[in-house]
Image (cartoon, rainbow, N blue to C red):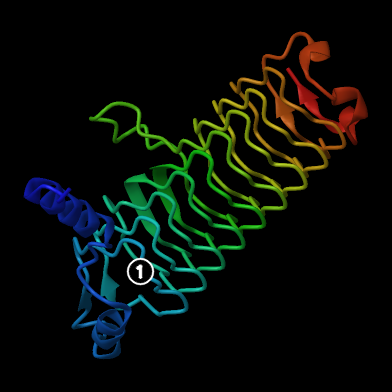
Amino acid sequence: MKTPAYCLALCAICTALSVSAADLTRAEVEQRLATADKTHVADLKRKDLTELDLSGLDFRNANLWGSDMRRANFSNSNLSGLVLDLAVMSKINLSGADLSNTSVFGVHVGGANLSHANLTGSRFIATLDRADLSHANLSNANWGVDMKNQSMGLMRASMNYVNLTGANLTNANLDRALLRFANLSGSVLKNANLFGVDLSGADFSNADLTNVNLTGTTLEETNFAGANLTGTHFAGIKDKSKLKGLSESKHLEAAIFD
């Protein structure tokens, strides 16, 4: 029996939809980047770049504002200093990429691979739930809430269930971020600001929390086993026994409880 014409048409439509809808090829992106400079940037604004392999490219002279970068491969690429506000970046591969001093505001970066990425001095107010940030460098990153600019409600970094094992968060500002069930084992957080952060179920085992501000944080089932607590500021903690792994932490006598 012959297949009805409408079934064949439907199959054709489904096949077409399954093919990547990217506006450009890698070669076309490379061509635009090659002729760009600070004065005449490569226009990739609002472009559909889904699932493209753009690894190892230099985007510092490009405009990627509002572009669709879902599932694209930007590993080891240079995006330093760019404004990626309102882009779509879920499940993007940015492993080993340079995102230093980059702005990412109002963006969904859930499930992304940012392992070993350079995020120093970056500004993220985005959703990064379940992202891989293992061994990433977030030193001096400003991912905290700007309380003077909350006309749309509390805009903050959401990092629930993220992997931050071995990450460098020295001097990072994560004010009021969400880090529920985040894995921060072996990470370095010297002088980091975690004021008002929800750390429910987070794992700080063997992390360096020297001089970290934990004022106003939620610490339900948070694990501190093996963590360095020199100068760590626990404010408002009346019952230390509720802090998981505290007896196995390092330099507990040098922590601050008030």
Q: Quadrant of residue 226?
A: top right
- Residue drawn where x is 14% and y is 47% of the image: 7
Asked if residue 118 shows in the view, the reply is yes
Expressed as whole percent of the image width and height from the top left, the position of residue 35 reads 24, 90
Q: Is residue 18 above or below residue 161?
A: below
Expressed as whole percent of the image width and height from the top left, the position of residue 125 reads 39, 43
Q: Is residue 122 above or below residue 219?
A: below
- Residue drawn where x is 56% and y is 54% of the image: 140
- Residue drawn where x is 14% and y is 53% of the image: 8
Q: Is residue 51 above or below residue 180?
A: below
Single out the residue that lies furthest toward the left.
5
Expressed as whole percent of the image width and height from the top left, the position of residue 54 reads 39, 74
Most foreground residue, 160 or 170: 160
Amino acid on which disc 1 is placed: Leu
Expressed as whole percent of the image width and height from the top left, the position of residue 27 reads 30, 84
Q: Residues within 10 Å of mark 1 (few under 14, many from 20)?
A: many
Q: Quadrant of residue 139?
A: bottom right
Single out the residue that lies furthest toward the front.
1
Give the residue pinned by disc 1.
Answer: 52
Q: Is residue 172 above or below residue 177?
A: below
Helix, strand or loop at mark 1: loop
Left or right of residue 193: residue 91: left
Mark count: 1
Asked if residue 66 shows in the view, the reply is no
Left or right of residue 255: residue 202: left
Single out the residue that lies furthest toward the bottom.
35
- Residue drawn where x is 47% and y is 78% of the image: 56
Single out the residue that lies furthest toward the top.
239
Quadrant of the drawing holding the C terminus: top right
